Image: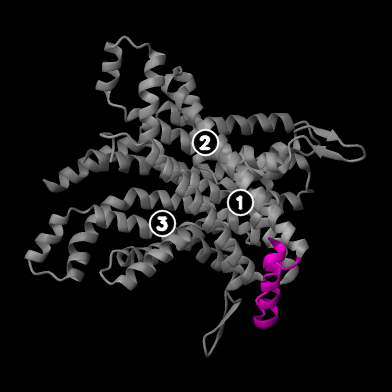
Amino acid sequence: MFDAISGFFLDLYEKTGLNFNIFYDEFEYDRVLAGAVTSLELMAWVICLSIVLGVIGASLQHMGSRTLKGLVEAYVQVFRNTPPMVQLLFFYFGLGSITPQVDMGGYNEPLISSFAWAVIGLSVFGAAYNVEIFRSGIESVPRSTLEASESLCLTKWQTNLHIVLPLAIRVSLPSLTANVISLAKTTSLVYVISVPEMTYVLNQIWSDSMNVPEMIFVLFLFYGIVIALIGAVFSLLERKLRIPGFGQ
Amino acid sequence: MIRDKVHARSSVLLMNVTRIRWQHVVGAAVLTVVALAATLILQSEPESPVATLVRWMPFILEGFGLNLVMSFLAMLLATLLGVPLGVAQVSRVYLVRTVAKGVTHLFRNTPWLVVLFTVMYVMPMTVDLGLTRVDISDWAKATLAFALPVMGNISEIVRGAIVSVPTGQWDSAQGLALTRRQTMTHIILPQCVKRSLPSWMNWYALLTLATPMAAILGVREAVGSAQAAMEAGGGRPDFLIPFYLFLLCLFFIYIYPIALLTKALEKKHAAS
């Protein structure tokens, strides 16, 4: 891959001065590749974990006791109404200052790395939105449907599993897609806790090589493509899950 | 009669907002309890971190003022640019429509931080106005950077609102011999205001929550000031929790009422 494109970009630099050094300098190429992989890994972790936490939160609100409902509501409001950047700083620097350190033979390494704090912080942030999304999905299941399932002698668990869940997933999928995309974009924010993802790595490269416009172009392109792919996957999912006579 | 109705409606709205359910209080209470717990744990230090926080509080609040100024100006700019862009998205001219769609999606699909870097590094420091040279300060650039993603989203909200107005309205306006421009400004857009107000407010809240990013590029807003204050106070690690917790509370106190009001408006709109 590198050998195939390096000639073209070196030529481009010599002829036009457009310095895409990440495509002809092997060291920078590896750095960017690692950054892209970190970004994608982070997105995958955060999206999956936030959905799992969102489902748990919404189920607690659906079935839990009054106290539990109140606690979930408080969690949702706190994380929705405070800046995600300050949340990350609070997690990494604040809570990171009281988490134990592991002796790595000569130097100490925190038990939870900055990448792990990024996963925790962003998942908890994204899940606060997902709880609301899933809750409105659950609430959209008509009363008559629940009564019908009760008249078929289904237990509460069976109703939730076979009636409420399949309908709620379909109703909340469009909002979930929007939130997942917004969450994928928010991963660039982990720059503040120095996780070497795409934004951080390209920032370092343009500081070294003074090729800001070119690297910013690459950054726009990277997020454009990733967001388009995530959008495509979710709209495919939406099509696959569609059942005739329900929704549009 | 109408005034009475409006009054009754607004008082219902107010009641919805002011009627604080206990779940809502829990939200604020959790933050306060954690803050108090942190205070008690850390009180045993020779110079309590909370004392340092209180000493530097005016400085941090002054920084928060800049957050608010940036959020107001950026929202104003985003609205002024976003509404015409949204109208352009439903233009009958193919080129205008395509360009407007392209700009809208470009700014909706790019992370805030990337837009911030772009504006900060690509925009010139000074602008030559012929007679005088104007320096553009960092916070002004950051304000522009925050306005752009919101502009894209407002454009999309306006487009959605225009499309959601029943087509019968267009037909009636045509029957009254109104031009397309007159229909848009006198019939369609006034109806869009009510439809899109909750989303508009939601984006204001998101915008305000994004303003701390300016600290990354050295703007002295609340987060930047808090970090500077921690440094000045001796940079002890036990400052971190109370200072960042204070910042979280600060934003929560400002944003939460807006979120409640947005929800009340949404409910009212759904009911009517």
Closer to the camera, A168 or A83?
Answer: A168
N-terminal of the pair, mark 2 or mark 1, is: 2
* Number of the label disc, if any, that sits on residue B153: 3
Label 3: element kind: helix
Quick one: SS at disc 2? helix
Q: Residue furthest left?
A: B175
Chain designation of label 2: A
Q: Give the range drawn in magenta.
A: A1-25
Residue B186 image-quadrant placement: bottom left
Query: CB under 8 Å between callouts 3 and 2?
Result: no
Q: Tell me where residue B192 appears, x and y as whole percent.
A: 26, 56
Q: Residue at x 49, y 40 (%)?
A: A80
Q: Is residue B260 among the parts visible in the rendering? A: no
Q: Nearer the viewer, residue A143 or B230?
A: A143
Residue at the extreme bottom of the image, as rendered = B131
For this rendering, which residue is in front, B92 or B146? B92
Disc assigned to residue A127: 2
Counting from the top left corner in percent of width and height, residue A238 is at 39, 40
Q: Where is residue A85 in the image (x, y as percent from the top left)?
A: 60, 48
Crowding around mark 3 (Cα neighbors within 10 Å: few <14, some 14 to 19, many 20+) is many
Is B122 located above or below residue B49 in the figure?
A: below
